């Protein structure tokens, strides 16, 4: 017994019929084939599934598609415009913040949400904003430096 | 002495895959989506040490979307480093909680998970050991009773025990060192 959902993903409107228990991460990855969003734990603990809903970072594994009816979703695939990388993406590359890369989309989106409301966020605010995403490679230091490079709060190369 | 020219030493070089990773384009194993692809689910042991007396896969074989169910006897080979003691799926006994016992391949992930729960395994529990110091004691339950017949990479097992190999590292005269030390 499917339900009708209308949502915008990366500025593209989608009108879909889904099983009501479909989670947002299952929908993004399995139905829209946007695999940039990762499911690390499925229980809201690792943050790898972080995407933005109306600009706010959320764990997509804990949301149903039904929860975002009528709302705007941004995934990592929506950041680069016409091949031009978002400054955060560029900074991650240049500042060595990427190892295995599994947390990178979630870290970048979490940082974007922060800088969109606080463009010159300092180290403490950055760490707080990224605290919902785990990095098993231990790239935290470089990740924070990459975000600081964009926010202008020293360190890293812009 | 001529000046050495360096092109890469000391240069800032970006990871070759960083661009794909920050854009979400990088394909990880779990991202692969091929036409007609099947999904696997594994049934694991809930006991630390037990003999497997029966595995009933009939429920899983009949489940929706299931294309194959496999158990240890379908592929009775062992692999390993120093000693080749580990089967792909447990064959006649399980030796740790979580050891894979059976696997299902089905058309969707949900169908594979549902089917794996329909497999029934009967176990005869055996005494378990949770400390390597207990494992080397005389009379400890043998985890691999057949250890001396396992293929191994040139290491000497000790037959009739749980000991995989004995290595001794010795350098210098420890007693003399201790005798001359201010503090140990």
Image (cartoon, rainbow, N blue to C red):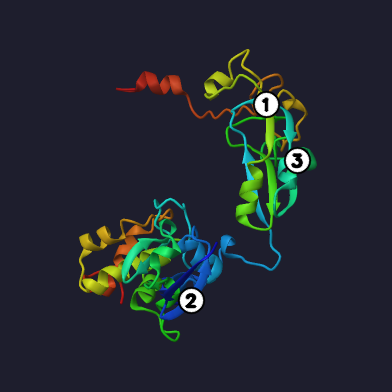
Residue A131 placed where, x, y %?
30, 56
Q: Residues within 10 Å of mark 3 (few under 14, many from 20)?
A: few
Q: Residue at x 74, y 30 (%)?
A: B54
| Label disc, if present, on residue A32 of the rendered structure | none
Q: Kindly state the secondary structure of the residue where label 1 is placed.
A: strand
Please determine if labels 3 and 1 lie on a single subunit: yes
Image quadrant in which you'd find residue B174? top left
**Do the residues at pointers 2 and 3 share their chain?**
no
Mark 2 or mark 1, which is nearer to you? 2
Q: CA distance from mark 2 to mark 3?
A: 41 Å
Q: Quadrant of the C terminus of chain A?
A: bottom left
Helix, strand or loop status at disc 2: strand
Q: Residue at x 62, y 47 (%)?
A: B114
- The disc, 3 or 1, on the residue closer to the chain's N-terminal end is 3
* Residue for badge 2: A15
In this rendering, would A45 be left or right of A111? Answer: right
In the image, A58 versus B181, the foreground residue is A58
Alpha carbons under labels 2 and 1: distance apart: 51 Å
Residue at image position (40%, 53%) is: A46
For mark 2, name the chain.
Answer: A
Mark 2 surroundings within 10 Å by alpha-carbon count, few (fewer than 14), some (14 through 19), many (20 or more): few
Q: Which residue is mark 1?
A: B123
Q: In this picture, is B16 found above or below B47? A: below
Q: Nearer the viewer, residue B157 or B87?
A: B87
Q: Which residue is mark 3?
A: B58
* Circles 2 and 3 in contact, beta carbons < 8 Å: no
Badge 1 sits on which subunit? B
Give the residue at x 65% y 25%: B50
Q: Quadrant of residue B44?
A: top right
């Amino acid at each position: 017994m499917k339900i009708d959902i209308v949502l915008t993903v990366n500025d593209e409107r989608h009108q879909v019929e889904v099983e009501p228990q479909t989670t947002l991460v299952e929908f993004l990855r399995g139905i829209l084939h946007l695999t940039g969003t990762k499911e690390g734990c499925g229980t809201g603990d690792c943050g790898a599934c972080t995407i933005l809903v109306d600009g706010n970072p959320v764990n997509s594994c804990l949301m149903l598609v039904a929860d975002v009816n009528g709302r705007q979703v941004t995934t990592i695939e929506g950041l680069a415009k016409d091949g031009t990388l978002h400054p955060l993406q560029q900074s991650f590359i240049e500042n060595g913040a990427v190892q295995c890369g599994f947390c990178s989309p979630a870290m970048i989106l979490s940082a974007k949400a922060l800088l969109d409301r606080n463009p010159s966020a300092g180290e403490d605010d950055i760490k707080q904003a990224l605290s919902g995403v785990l990095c098993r490679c231990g790239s935290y230091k470089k990740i924070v430096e990459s975000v600081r490079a964009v926010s202008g709060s020293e360190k890293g190369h812009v | 002495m001529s000046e050495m020219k360096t092109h890469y030493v000391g240069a800032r070089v970006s990871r070759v895959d960083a661009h794909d990773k920050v854009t979400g384009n990088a394909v990880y194993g779990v991202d692969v989506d091929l036409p007609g692809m099947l999904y696997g689910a594994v049934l694991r042991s809930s006991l630390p040490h037990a003999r497997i007396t029966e595995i009933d896969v009939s429920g899983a074989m009949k489940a929706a979307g299931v294309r194959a169910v496999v158990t240890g006897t379908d592929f009775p080979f062992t692999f390993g480093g120093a000693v080749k003691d580990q089967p792909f799926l447990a064959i006649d006994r399980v030796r740790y909680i979580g050891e894979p016992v059976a696997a299902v391949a089905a058309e969707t992930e949900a169908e594979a998970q549902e089917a794996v729960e329909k497999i029934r395994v009967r176990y005869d529990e055996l005494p378990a050991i949770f400390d390597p110091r207990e494992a080397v004691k005389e009379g400890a339950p043998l985890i691999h009773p057949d250890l001396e017949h396992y293929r191994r990479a040139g290491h000497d097992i000790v037959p009739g025990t749980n000991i995989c190999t004995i290595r001794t590292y010795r350098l210098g005269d420890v007693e003399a060192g201790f005798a001359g030390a201010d503090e140990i």
